[in-house]
Image: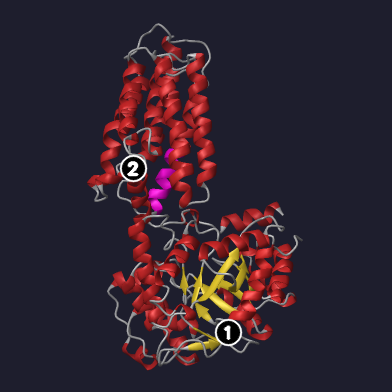
Amino acid sequence: MLGDMLDDLSTYTVGDFVPFGAEAYARLFVQHNARFGVAPALGAVAGVAALWAAVSGRGRVAAALLAAAWGWVGWAFFAGSYAGLNWAGSYLAGVAGLQGVLMAFMAWRGWLSGRAGSGGLAGGAEAGAGRGIGHGIGYATGVALAVGGLALYPLLDPLSGRPWAGVELFGHAPEPTALVTLGLVLACGRRRLIGLTIPVLICGLGGVTARVLESPGWWVSSAAAALALIALPIDALARRATG
Amino acid sequence: MPPMTRRAALSTLAVGAAGLALAPAAGAAPAGRITKAIPGADARIPVIGMGTWQTFNVGDDPALRAARTEVLATFLALGGGMVDSSPMYGSSQAVVGHARAALKGKAPLDRLVSADKIWTRDGDETVEQLDETARRWGVERFDVMQIHNLLAWPAHLETLRRLKAEGRVRYIGITTSHGRRHADLARIMAREPIDFVQLTYDITHREAEKRLLPLAAERGIAVIVNRPYDGGASVTRLKRSGAKVPPWAAEADIRDWPGFLLKWIVSHPAVTVAIPATTRVDHMRENMAAGYGRLPDAALRTRMAQHIASL
């Protein structure tokens, strides 16, 4: 039975899991933005506020903003808009909701400390606490990813010919939300795998979808996730060495 | 099994009152349109149908729904028959339903042969899903109802047989794609009384010729061919290559690559209908052109396959 299932699965390609075309996907974001009025703009403002809070030592505020953003993306985007094109949308809404809960938990525990502290890949003692922000490859990479998710990623599709009305913004669309989360958790988090895992998966899913749909910047979010995953152990080792 | 619903009972009565959409005299068929008989039935359908995977999944976007309505209108105006969808295809069923409603009184909807699928692991949900699918299409009955990718097929098949007896569906079938589970499908075709089978078959993917197509002919099962362009790859590759359609293909009234690929498929004696999918009216016109004129004979089919292999 399991063997048959695995044999069957082996005949699928990633394209078999993308049940819509490029045109419908682009229009989905136009419709999604139009449906919620000022929400996309509020999302962008919340993203900037989260970055500012994280780098200025207000990690709980940043984590709370990320939690709210994921909750909104799960409810409004995955369950509300995306599920109209893909039956998997309702499951992805649950995944995004779970990320919201995880970020809320990190806010409660103070694990987005606003300091470049970590005890390693899975967290642990505040080895780097007190070292201050502004040091380390994790911090630099993380801030770059967050800025990229807030300011550069949204330009990607409009500059490749998709309508500006469909711009993907933090807090309203999944991939920029994932990129900013990757950045802030990498830069300022402890027990970072808790906050990174789902955003990495979302970036991977977005990259696969964009690849199947032959979008010009299909590799961007996957590359960003890979960058975070490369920076994470390097940063953790560096902190151990200096901690 | 769940009891027959009130809605199903009403539908059965409606079927009796309205007659069957596939009756041979329904609508005025365009001259020269190629049709094939459904084995064991007094009905014929056009050899070119229409799929909806990806192409009709446009959500509730008004502009894209209007564009797909135009695609369906073109399909029907050019003599198209079978439209195939599935609950797995996102909003495709609802978009077909939207297009049907928009074309009421403006297009020959009586030509439309409705084909859809049951796609659920729960063998007790057959009727519930069929009801939901009918609601999305805006119909009360289906011409062809299939079990998608053999999913929970024993339970669904039993229910579909009952629904067929009640007149809720006219034909029942089972589907696969991408060459999956041919051995299982062959066993079902050999043992179970089904009217249609849907499978993947194209000029570069000919696995179905070994067992499934001969078995379909032997058992009197109509064959729907999905992915006739290998998901669009084959026709795109040929068009981009700059290769010209060989002049000898004109023997079968073939003038372009879509016609070449589609006529090769539907000229197989066991194949009843191919269901290419498209988002574009101009591509629909190309597809539908393959449903007219002469079909290649066995010798020409061989030559066509050899030509594609040589490119």
Q: Residues within 10 Å of mark 1 (few under 14, many from 20)?
A: many
Magenta segment range? A202-212
Counting from the top left corner in percent of width and height, residue B269 is at 55, 87
Mark 1 belongs to which amino acid? Ala
Task: Say the numbered circle drawn on residue B270.
Answer: 1
Q: Chain of mark 1?
A: B
Please report the residue visible at 50 percent of the width from the left and 59 percent of the height from the top.
Answer: B89
Does the magenta-highlighted stretch encompass residue A209? yes
Q: Is residue A211 above or below residue B1?
A: above
Tell me, yes or no, if residue B200 can be seen here.
no
Q: Quadrant of residue B39?
A: bottom right
Task: Say the numbered circle drawn on residue A33.
Answer: 2
Tell me, yes or no, if residue B99 can be seen here.
yes
In this rendering, the label closer to the viewer, 2 or 1: 2
Q: Name the element at disc 2.
A: helix
Q: Name the element at disc 1.
A: loop
Counting from the top left corner in percent of width and height, residue B285 is at 34, 78
